Image: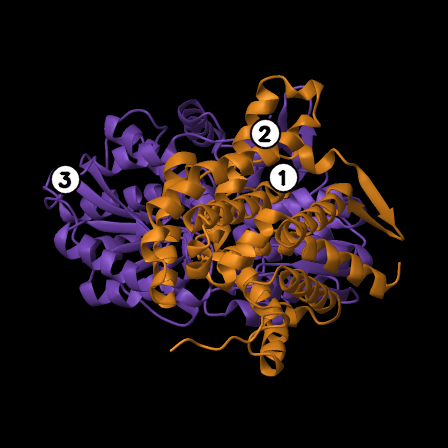
Chain colours: A orange, B purple
């Protein structure tokens, strides 16, 4: 396989993972207008929860049906969203709607710090492993290189997630209501829309996507404290490139970051970190609001 | 499977921290301030196992008669050992404050600590300012004593140059064919320095070997798919890595799933500490070191230190349900060195608890035995230790369900450490002058 094809495959694998961890962040910002720093914590909790749940699954005799471990991964993300979504949105964030965006960043940063310690209290500092789902799908030989089938499954999951979010927002009644709330929440409320419920649903969806990113990542890593820090940084880069609040933007941003990073690792490995933020800087130079965000007039 | 959680270490540490009260040490006690990572990414790999080992040794010493001679006497020269444990997380500025608290408020008699090289560079000037006897027990950077000179500060473990010199020497002595090599190391001082030491050593021992790609993913990257593709494409004979903790575990999980270990010889400078977590997921045939004759290499060594090693090994395994890897070995060699120094100072001063000055005088140039070998404070005018090292190859014992280290090579301390008065990089560049490898 020539170098260009290798870069494309590596870039798309990384982009698939990046999209899953970024799309929830952009969704929450789009609906709630909150830049959720705690997204990284939800990702890490998703990883821990899936490690625990898959561990329980195999301890309960899951070896007979190992494919069930994939259901355990997804179930873990659902549980995280059901528990933490309402707790954070109803219990804290709703009191800050309409307040300064910087204040909201500080509030979610505080939540991030609290959840980091909560994870240590629940899971301790030692690593968790869930290898089985990573190797169940076997290898894929592309030219002279072997890839793990699971990596391509993550790309598939990213496509499914992207389509599901886009179709829900653009082709369903509830999606149109959400878009109306994004456009003007006050007007939507006067038209009878239960805006708090829309906010809660959007935040839970974002929490699910963050936790799903962690759950799908857990089988290929050692799940340890501090997992969410790096993720939130690169996820921010992706959604800023694509435009905060834009689902297609997150997809394009993930592909741009994934492929440029892969090209750097193969061709100029010293610039691996630089290249992500270089791409972001170039995009912002020509499109300060990101590739897909619409320029909005500011209300005074 | 396979969800692994090793020990309730943090709870044990909290209890351990409660062993000592806030008051100053009495004349019949010797109070140590221990600083190591109890939280953060280095906790699981280094900090927690180190203090688990340290706590165990302190308890055995305080009971007396639990250790083989010459460590069978109670405490330190009859003084009961008290310990205050402090978390190293938080960065160098915080650690300087913690150090001052330990010395000035807790009035500890000695400080034993520091995994992070950043902390090891920040603490010595403060230790000398406060005239506080301090042992750096773990950190790897050679710069501590190559760039500075401190009266009250000692490092009881060899610096990190030894790890990579030993790897290169192992490849040479085992007649590996190395036409090329590549590396994947963490993008901070540890990874960069380790790669520089390895390439410097390889340039002397395999001058014709081609240096292929050198990858430095950021610390905590987690995802190594692209890097593994690059390494697979390079087809280097050897892939070097000094990664540790979750970064090493993640890299190995992803690399072995894609067959990197079958295409290239993996050589891990500090890889032993992930064996308890990975077990049979660590592939056979991986060359690895333990930053000293530590862990499995110490257990396999035999000889006159075997009783000492087995005593601590068995106690650790019984207490924590897992065998000790490199971190507790470095804590043990620090505490046994401190015991030797205290008792030497007491022998010289008529049997009273030594002052910081007396301790520093006793520690300077000291030699003692530890489970990791014979330790000599031979560098930096008697302030920096050298120690023997070992490199081996992994082999899973399926019958007994445990990892073994086979084809282990033991290197004399003076074979893999630079001589007194010479900086590590100069030593490598000049072709290991003064090395004694026979």
In terms of depth relative to the viewer, which is nearer, A232 or B279?
A232
* Residue on which the image places disc 3: B21
User: At x 36% / y 62%, what residue is drawn?
Assistant: A98
Mark 2 is surrounded, within 10 Å at the Cα level, by few (under 14), some (14 to 19) or many (20 or more) other residues, namely many
The reply to whether dot 2 and dot 3 touch (C-beta < 8 Å) is: no
* Residue on which the image places disc 2: A54
The reply to whether dot 1 and dot 2 touch (C-beta < 8 Å) is: yes
In terms of depth relative to the viewer, which is nearer, A86 or A171?
A171
Residue B3, above or below B220:
above
Residue A44, above or below B235:
above
Image location of residue B376, percent across then percent down: 42, 51
Q: Gap in Å between the C-alphas at discs 3 and 1?
A: 44 Å
- Which disc, if any, is residue A219? 1
User: At x 44% / y 57%, what residue is drawn?
Assistant: A37
Mark 3 is surrounded, within 10 Å at the Cα level, by few (under 14), some (14 to 19) or many (20 or more) other residues, namely few
Please indicate whether residue B100 sits to the left or right of residue A167 in the image.
Answer: left
Q: Disc 3: which chain?
A: B
Nearest to the eye among marks 2 and 3: give it: 2
Image location of residue A69, percent across then percent down: 65, 29
Residue A199: tell me if it is visible: yes
Q: Disc 2: which chain?
A: A
Please indicate whether residue B321 sits to the left or right of residue B78 in the image.
Answer: right
Tag 2 or tag 1, which sits nearer the N-term?
Answer: 2
In terms of depth relative to the viewer, which is nearer, A213 or B66?
A213
Q: Disc 1 on helix, strand or loop? A: helix
Image location of residue B190, percent across then percent down: 52, 60
Q: Disc 1: which chain?
A: A
Q: Disc 2 on helix, strand or loop? A: helix
């Amino acid at each position: 396989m020539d170098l260009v094809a290798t870069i494309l495959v590596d870039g798309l694998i990384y982009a698939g993972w990046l999209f899953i961890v970024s799309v929830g962040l952009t969704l929450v910002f789009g609906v709630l207008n909150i830049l959720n720093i705690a997204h990284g914590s939800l990702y890490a909790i998703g990883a821990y929860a899936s490690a625990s749940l898959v561990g329980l699954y195999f301890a309960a005799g899951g070896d007979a049906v190992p494919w069930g471990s994939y259901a355990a991964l997804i179930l873990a993300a659902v549980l995280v969203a059901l528990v933490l979504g309402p707790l954070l949105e109803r219990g804290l964030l709703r009191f800050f709607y309409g307040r300064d965006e910087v204040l909201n960043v500080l509030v979610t940063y505080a939540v991030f710090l609290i959840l980091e310690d909560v994870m240590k209290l629940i899971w301790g500092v030692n690593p968790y492993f869930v290898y089985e789902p990573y190797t169940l799908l076997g290898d894929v030989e592309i030219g002279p290189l072997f890839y793990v089938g699971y990596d391509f499954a993550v790309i598939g999951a990213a496509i499914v997630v992207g389509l599901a979010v886009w179709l829900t927002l653009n082709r369903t009644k509830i999606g149109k209501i959400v878009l109306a709330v994004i456009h003007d929440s006050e007007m939507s409320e006067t038209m009878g829309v239960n805006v708090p419920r829309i906010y809660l649903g959007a935040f839970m969806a974002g929490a699910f996507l963050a936790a799903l990113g962690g759950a799908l990542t857990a089988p290929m890593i050692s799940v340890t404290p501090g997992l969410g820090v790096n993720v939130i940084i690169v996820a921010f880069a992706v959604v800023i490139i694509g435009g905060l609040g834009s689902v297609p933007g997150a997809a394009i941003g993930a592909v741009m970051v994934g492929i440029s990073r892969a090209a750097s690792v193969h061709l100029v490995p010293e610039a691996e970190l630089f290249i992500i933020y270089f791409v972001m800087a170039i995009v912002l130079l020509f499109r300060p609001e990101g590739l897909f965000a619409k320029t909005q007039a500011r209300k005074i | 499977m396979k969800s692994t959680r090793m020990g309730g270490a943090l709870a044990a540490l909290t209890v351990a921290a409660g062993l000592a009260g806030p008051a100053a040490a009495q004349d019949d006690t010797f109070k140590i301030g221990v600083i190591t990572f109890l939280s953060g990414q280095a906790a699981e790999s280094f900090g927690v196992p180190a203090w688990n080992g340290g706590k165990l040794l302190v308890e055995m010493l305080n009971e007396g008669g639990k250790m083989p001679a010459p460590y069978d006497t109670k405490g330190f020269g009859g003084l009961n050992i008290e310990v205050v444990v402090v978390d190293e997380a938080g960065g160098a500025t915080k650690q300087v404050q913690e150090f001052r608290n330990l010395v000035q408020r807790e009035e500890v008699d000695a400080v034993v600590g520091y995994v992070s090289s950043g902390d090891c560079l920040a603490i010595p000037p403060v230790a000398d300012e406060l005239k506080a006897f301090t042992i750096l027990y773990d950190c790897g950077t050679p710069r501590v004593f190559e760039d500075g000179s401190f009266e009250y500060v000692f490092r009881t473990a060899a610096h990190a140059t030894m790890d990579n010199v030993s790897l290169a020497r192992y490849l040479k002595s085992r007649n590996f064919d190395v036409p090329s090599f590549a590396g994947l190391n963490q993008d901070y001082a540890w990874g960069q320095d380790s790669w520089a030491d390895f390439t410097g050593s390889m340039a002397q021992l395999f001058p014709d070997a081609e240096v292929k790609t050198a990858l430095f993913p950021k610390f905590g990257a987690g995802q190594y798919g692209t890097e593994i593709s690059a390494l697979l494409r390079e087809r280097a004979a050897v892939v070097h890595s000094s990664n540790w903790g979750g970064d090493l575990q993640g890299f190995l999980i992803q690399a072995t799933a894609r067959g990197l270990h079958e295409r290239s010889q993996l050589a891990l400078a500090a890889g032993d500490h992930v064996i308890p977590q990975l077990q049979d997921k660590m592939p056979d045939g991986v060359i690895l070191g333990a930053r000293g004759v530590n862990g499995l290499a110490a257990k396999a060594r035999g000889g006159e230190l075997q009783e000492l090693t087995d005593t601590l090994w068995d106690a650790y395994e019984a207490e924590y349900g897992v065998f000790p890897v490199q971190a507790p070995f470095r804590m043990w060699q620090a505490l046994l060195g401190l015991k030797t120094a205290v008792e030497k100072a007491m022998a010289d001063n008529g049997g009273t608890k030594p002052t910081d000055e007396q301790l520093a005088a006793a520690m300077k140039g000291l030699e003692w035995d530890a489970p990791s070998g014979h330790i000599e404070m031979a560098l930096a005018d008697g302030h920096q230790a050298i120690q023997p090292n070992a490199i081996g190859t992994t082999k899973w014992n399926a019958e007994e369900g445990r990892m073994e280290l086979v084809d282990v090579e033991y290197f004399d301390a003076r074979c893999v450490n630079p001589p007194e008065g010479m900086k590590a990089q100069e030593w490598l560049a000049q072709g290991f002058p003064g090395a004694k490898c026979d």
